[in-house]
Image (cartoon, rainbow, N blue to C red):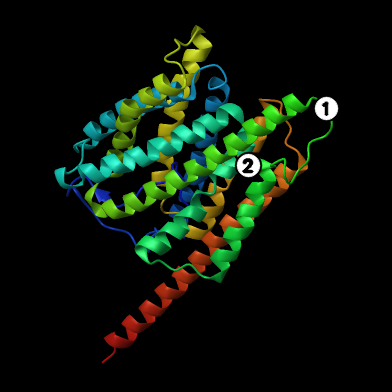
Amino acid sequence: MTIYQETSALLPGYSTSSRSYVLPSATNQQPEDATPHQETKGLIYMALSAFFFSSMSLLVSLTAKILPSFEVLLFRGIIQTILGIATCRYLGISPWGKPEVRFLLFCRGLAGTCALGLFFFSLSIMPLADATVIFFLGPVFTAILARIIMKEPFGPLDALASVVTMCGVVLVAKPSVLFPQSPGNNNTLGDEDGRRLLGALCAACGATGTATAYVLVRKIGKEAHPMQHVVALGLVACLFSPIGLYTLQGGFIVPQGALMWSGVISLGVAAFLGQILLNNGQMAPLGPGTLMRMNDIVFAFIFQITIQHQHPDVFSYIGATLVMLCTGSMGLNKWRLEKKRTEQEKLQSDQQARP
């Protein structure tokens, strides 16, 4: 199973000189000729990408408390589209992709837009760390969808890890049915519990969107450059976020002050830089690379405590630990299986080559 979020790297291997892809394996394994130095650089890139994506989530959490979450998504879409098109022009490729895959790119962008819209809304009503942990259900849904649609392996360890991950999410969401609230103002407690459950539901639904986007990325495969995916996501966000903004959240609110403007612009730039770094981190080994992606959750907790001055409770810590351990173990197990498969194929190839 590949650890994939809407903030995960897209398929690597595109050559701007040949305008074609070298399609990687189904598990997004790193190139075999990667040197230890390249692998180390890949891990550093992935850790930095986690920092930038977590910074984006922090900025969304701060700005979406004042601006509608769909408006924040609109700003991200505009910035991502501009930077994506500029990068495509710099690379000498079309931003729109081949005509035969444009519809799939649109669907991929729509799935990603829905995922981000739901995640951004959850960040507006939930603590940063809790929303991030629940959004990391994406790898579980990805594994399930990949099994159903692409017939990829989903063994007993994956099933057990998925169940334990769900238990971790329940600990983070803390529904009142399982976690009775302390005595106090029942109306206030009821409203707070309702907001937390709504935020958890939105983050979980957003995770299903990331899984759908990943399956579409795999479906498109070698036919599109990673930057074309970035442009597609940005364009669709620009088209559809105003619908949610005006139908569900009362319309556009002009950001007030330089601080607010710098926030919405910075979150778009941070997301774009995170994607670039993650794409450049594909030389990292799959297993350690999976662990580097877990830094999203670590940074989210650090930012929530140090910048937002909100301290998670013990259940959030336990739930986050379960999610990180289980998704990490699924990635490491897949890495182990891939190494074993590669060694077997190499051995068979050597045996066939002998006279």
**Residue type at the position of mark 2:** Val
Disc 1 crowd, CA 10 A, few/some/many (<14, 14-19, 20+): few
Vertical placement of residue 20 versus 109, above or below: below
In the figure, is residue 344 to the left or right of 296? left
Q: Mark 1 points at which residue?
A: 184
Pick out the residue farthest to the front: 187
Residue 206 visible in the shown view: yes
Q: What element carries label 2?
A: helix
N-terminal of the pair, mark 1 or mark 2, is: 1
Q: Mark 2 points at which residue?
A: 298
Placement of the C terminus among the 4 image quadrants: bottom left
Residue 29 visible in the shown view: no
| Image location of residue 112, percent across then percent down | 39, 39
Pick out the residue farthest to the left: 99
Pick out the residue farthest to the bottom: 355
| Image location of residue 297, percent across then percent down | 60, 42
**Residue type at the position of mark 1:** Gly
Q: How far apart are marks 1 and 2 (CA)?
A: 32 Å
Relative to the observer, which residue lies in front, 354 or 77? 77
| Image location of residue 194, percent across then percent down | 64, 32
Vertical placement of residue 159 versus 58, above or below: below
Q: Disc number at residue 318?
A: none
User: Image point 59% across, 39% down: which residue?
Assistant: 200
Relative to the observer, which residue lies in front, 345 or 143? 143
| Image location of residue 97, percent across then percent down | 20, 41
In the figure, is residue 317 to the left or right of 261? right
Relative to the observer, which residue lies in front, 9 or 178? 178
